[in-house]
Amino acid sequence: MLRHGLLAAGVCVLAVLCSAQLTDPSRTSIVGPWENAANPSEHLNLGQDGQFSLDQHGQHHDGTWSLSGKTLQLHLTSTSTLTAQWNGDAFIDSDQTWWIRPDAPPAPAPRQPAATRPGTREALSDPGAPPPSPNPALPQSTASVGGEPACPAAAGAYYLDGRSWRPMYRITPDGTSTHVKPIPFASSAKGMLRYRDAIAPVNVGPTPRFCLNGVAPVWRNVIIVAVDVKNNYREVQVSEVKEYSGLSSGIPPSKRQLVDLKPVSTSVINLAVMKPLLPGQYMIFPQGTGSVGYDFGVIAGLP
């Protein structure tokens, strides 16, 4: 009975924690203007009457829109529909373009960086338009901060590779789980967030350096967390229910790494670890909680 009670409590706690991050948007909340986070000259307006207007790639589109769960559907014609998915921060189309409110903070870089991926425009663009040429590499500033190059202008997280900043991959949780330990007089249930893949696409050495470009209040709480690796995914503990002490939320201190934060401007922070990291998998969480972050692996011997 105790084990089942803790399991139910753990699932409930995890559901509460995740609902704030993954709740479906309401129709009323998304009415109004949106813009391409990487190109504010491209606009999308969702009307209260169910009509939309879209200006993208030098073309204008009109039609009707609908919302199904986290999926925004733009109906150009009776047989042509464009879609984008809500991730808690923005609508993301199939080209990984982020559509945000005009007054929202700049969106971090998507998991597949434009510098290394020849993209094809699908959602939120004219299906008949030819695909654009591959995106150019991220611009590097010639200015330096403390002997390092300045952080790239595009919002996101970057790691220092020699003398150049390289984009990191943005990742969101794709599931949850509960770990129950039915130990007499010490039972517990841990709420976990799961992330796809067992290994991050970015590898660094034990003393990596990062820069973060975004809105300062967001980056102010940035943490680096060691994550647990399973067969084909990684997970982070975000809550725990114990038999006698009750509920605790947040990432355990034992998983948090000591970091050195150095604000460079109102929107840029340089980040370094205060002691070498052990080989393994890690994530940077800008808001200080297990949710949306940037993943990387540490390999001994890398500079």
Image (cartoon, rainbow, N blue to C red):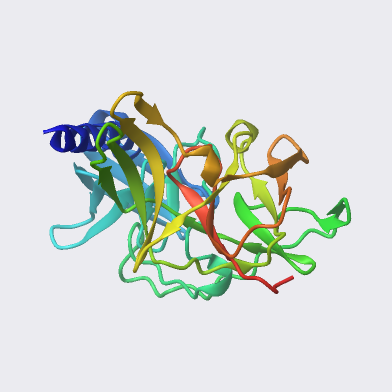
Identify whether 89 is placed above or below 118.
above
Residue 240, image x, y percentages: 35, 35
Q: Quadrant of the C terminus?
A: bottom right
Residue at 61% across, 38% down? 219
Please name whichever residue, 247 or 199, is drawn nearer the observer in this view of the structure. 247
Residue 48 in view in this figure: no
Q: Nearer the viewer, residue 243 or 266?
A: 243
On the picture, is 176 further left or further right than 225?
Answer: left
Q: Which image quarter is the N terminus in?
A: top left
The answer to whether residue 116 is left or right of residue 119 is right
Asked which quadrant contains residue 259, the reply is top right
Task: Tell which residue pokes out farthest to the top in this image.
Answer: 245
What is the x, y in percent for residue 51? 24, 40
Q: Residue 74: x, y in percent?
A: 25, 51
**Position above or below: 124 against 264:** below
Query: Is 90 drawn above or below residue 128 in the view shown?
Result: above
